[in-house]
Image (spheres, helix red, strand yellow):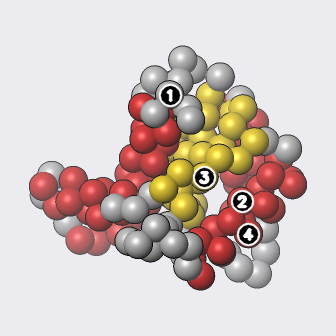
Amino acid sequence: MRIMGLDIGDKRIGVAISDPLGWTAQGIKTIIRESHNNKDVDEIKKLIIDYQVDKIVIGLPKNMNNTLGPQSEKVMEYGKILEEVTGKEIVYIDERMTTMSAHRTLIEADVSRKKRKGVVDKIAAVYILQLYLDSGGK
């Protein structure tokens, strides 16, 4: 059973996929969001088919005091759309600090600022999915 991890932002969506046994997460790509069409949703649907995904884990950007803010609401709205068009189960996981951790990892690897912008969302998606896998899928 493969699981997809998504880091959904206003401009980009990081995508990760689990291995078939559900032990490790690998970054697949970063999708550029286009608000005027559903190209990003279509791209996710294609990846679901290509990788035979059974479940989608989406990072939920909670505030530091554990409340949900406007960005969380946007992410959950997008999750509802994905659930409707794919028929896949959607699971939300607290994503606080994943993007910061991804940035830190890339800085420590001496990746330039320009290159970081293109991959940080994909790395954050890996962190989100790996958190879910490590929790035993709960």
**Residue 51 against residue 124 in the figure, above or below:** above
Residue 127, image x, y percentages: 39, 47
Q: Residue at x 51, y 72 (%)?
A: 67
Q: Dot 4, how many residues are within 10 Å of its Cα: few (below 14), some (14-19), or many (20+)?
A: few
Three-letter amino acid code at disc 3?
Tyr
Q: Secondary structure at mark 1?
A: loop
Query: How many numbered discs?
Result: 4
Image quarter of the N terminus: top right
**Residue 25 against residue 37 in the figure, above or below:** above
Residue 79 numbered mark, or none: 2
The residue that label 4 is drawn on is 77
Three-letter amino acid code at disc 1?
Gly
The residue that label 3 is drawn on is 92
Residue 4, image x, y percentages: 60, 41
The residue that label 1 is drawn on is 136
Q: Dot 1, how many residues are within 10 Å of its Cα: few (below 14), some (14-19), or many (20+)?
A: few
Three-letter amino acid code at disc 4?
Glu
Residue 78 visible in the picture: yes
